Amino acid sequence: MTTPLKILGLCGSLRQGSYNQAVLRVAQELAPAAGLSIESADIADMPLYNEDVYAQGFPPPVERLREQIRAADGLLFVTPEYNYSIPGVLKNAIDWVSRPPEQPFAGKPAAVMGASPSTLGTARAQYHLRQSLVCLDVHFLNAPEVMIASAHTRFDAQGRLTHEPTREIIGKLLEALAAWTRRLKPA
C-alpha cells in the first residue's frame, strides 16, 4: 500500500456548527478509502491583511499556514457562499499566504466543495474561488463538483451528514483529487 497523500483542508467558515466544517469532517472520514490523509488548517487567528504588517514579516499564524500548504501534496477548499462570493476570512488567508517570497500555492492540485441552505449550493462562491486562485497557479480539479444545496435537509441536529448520495459524491471527489494529485505530483 502506498503512503496516503497529504491534503490540507481549508474551510471558509469559522462557525462551530457550520455545515462546511461538517463537510470537511466527512471528507476526513472518507479520505482513507481514497488514499488520502486530510489535515484541517486553522485560519481563525489570522490578522487582517495589512501591507504595513507584511512589511515587518509574516505573523506566526500566516507562517504556519504557508508551511502547511508547502508541505501538503494537495488542497481541499470547503467554502460557504456569502453575497455571491467566498467569505472574507478565506480570502484574507489566501491574500496573506500569496505574498512573496515563494508563495506556496504555485502548482498545487486542489478541489473545492461547499454546503449552503440555498437551492444553488455554493456554485457562485466556488467559481469565484477558482477565479481568485488562477493567478496563484492553483490547479483545480474540474469534476466532480460538490455543491451541496439545501444543506439543512442533509445534516442531522448533531451536524452529521445523513444524505447518502451526498456522501457518495464527496467520496468520488476525494478519489478524483487523489488521482489528480498523483498526476500532477513531481516524480
Image (cartoon, rainbow, N blue to C red):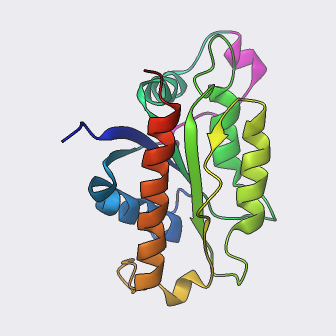
> In the current view of this chain or complex, which residue is farthest to the left?
1
Q: In this view, does 56 lie above or below 67?
A: above
The segment highlighted magenta reads 42-55
Q: In this view, does 12 lie to the left or right of 173?
A: right
Left or right, 158 with respect to 142, comes to left
- Tell me what residue is drawn at x 35 percent, y 39 percent: 5
The one of 119 and 63 positioned closer to us in this rendering: 119
| Residue 103 placement: quadrant | top right
Q: Main secondary structure of the magenta part?
A: loop
- Above or below — where is 136 with respect to 114? above
Residue in the foreground of this view, choosing between 6 and 96: 6
Q: Where is residue 13 in the image (x, y as percent from the top left)?
A: 56, 58
Residue 142 visible in the shown view: yes
Number of dots carrying numbers = 0
* Residue 18, placed above or below residue 13: below
Task: Give the residue displayed 79% in from the left and 45% down from the top.
Answer: 131
Residue 161 spot, x, y in % from top left: 40, 79
Residue 124 in the image, given as x and y percentages of width and height? 78, 64
Image quadrant of residue 83?
bottom right
| Percent position of residue 138, x then y | 65, 35
Question: For residue 53: magenta?
Answer: yes
Visible residue check, residue 48:
no
Q: Is residue 28 magenta?
A: no
- The quadrant of the image that shows the N terminus is top left
